[in-house]
Amino acid sequence: MEKKKESKLIFSGVQPTGNLHLGNYLGAIKNWVKYQEDSNCIFCIVDLHAITVSENREKILDNTREVAAAYIASGIDPNKNTIFVQSNVTGHSELSWILSCHTPIGWLNRMTQFKDKAGKNKEKAPLGLYSYPVLMAADILLYKSTHVPVGEDQKQHLELSRDVAQAFNRYYNQEFFPIPEPIITGTATRVMSLKNGLNKMSKSDPSDQSRINLMDDSISIIKKIQKARTDSEPFPKSLEEMDNRPEINNLINIFSALSEDLPQNVVAQYVGKDFKFFKEDLSDLVNQKISNISTEMHKLLKDLNYLDLILKKGCQKANEIAEKNVKDLKKIIGFFEA
């Protein structure tokens, strides 16, 4: 008998920017696979967010299909969940505009990611990069989502989504939008670079050695783990010793997340041993999880008709929810209904 799903609705998404990596898997997708067992889940490929940065506009269709393949290869069941592409559901853009008219500029001025991404050239940055937290709020609220998995760097955006939902509800004296709750899980929600433990693992890092890509083969994974930066000190004896050793901390947290064991147990298992043995076991562990995903992704990407069919079906399911919610919202606002 199929387990009854809870009433909560989970929404999350990944940008189709190419080179999905271990950080994307451990920080997001791995947990999504668990959520689908007892929750209603909507997993989006957020291509509208991707075009806020010019370099992401290249190969966006290929990258969109790659994300879809990664979802399915990682264990997300398209029959249990809604998997779709953001730009295929016009409600995202429409709600984003409506919410923009209920979002004070001051709230957006507090968003730190715009400052980080725009850097010194913020006057040349596109409007979309500045306002995309409102689109993110629309993504979540369009489906009346109750829970959102977030990493440390996304907490601020979820807070904005909650503020916008509350502001809309107050303005129209309606409890239309649920106030979404964050889901923060796991020891490796923020996976760092294999070359510098102070930097987040990222596809934009010029060194491919800094990350484990989901489409890497077994040999590449082994070589990258072997070359991963450590230090000259012995293996730590306690978690406290890891505080000032970011690269070691990162590798132990990756091992912990993949093995689903506590970091302190990983430390206890390898204390007094050479890093060589730890890296060999970590390579085996990463290969067990990632090489299977890589193989399945390559297989899926050879059958684009199958992938596209899944995305089209997901779009239909998402539109059914989105169109109803937008229609109800327009009535609350008082828009003319043709």
Image: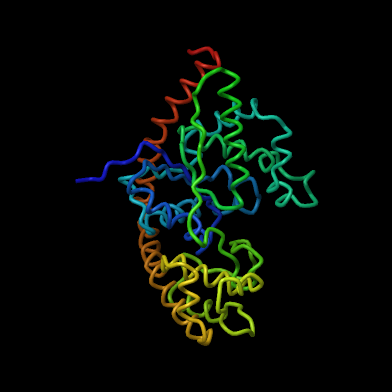
Vertical order, 113 against 135 (above or below): below
* Image point (48%, 77%), residue name: 268
- Residue found at x 54% / y 54%: 59
Q: Where's residue 277, x and y in %?
A: 47, 85
Direction from residue 69 to residue 226 in the image, left or right: right
Which image quadrant is residue 300 in?
A: bottom left
Whether residue 195 sits left or right of residue 272 in the image: it is right
Residue placed farthest to the left in the image? 1
Q: From the viewer's side, name the closer residue of 247 and 245.
A: 245
Colour option used? rainbow
The residue located at (58%, 74%) in the rendering is: 248
In front: 206, or 267? 267
Q: Is residue 123 left or right of residue 54?
A: right
Q: Is residue 19 above or below residue 150?
A: below
Q: Give percent across and percent down for residue 213.
A: 50, 66
Query: How many discs appear?
Result: 0
Please tell me whether residue 144 is drawn above or below residue 33 in the rendered image: above
Task: Give the image location of residue 210, x and y in percent.
Answer: 59, 70
Residue beneath the point at 58% across and 62% down:
203
**Image location (x, y in percent) of residue 271:** 51, 82
Q: Which residue is more in the foreground, 20 or 107?
A: 107
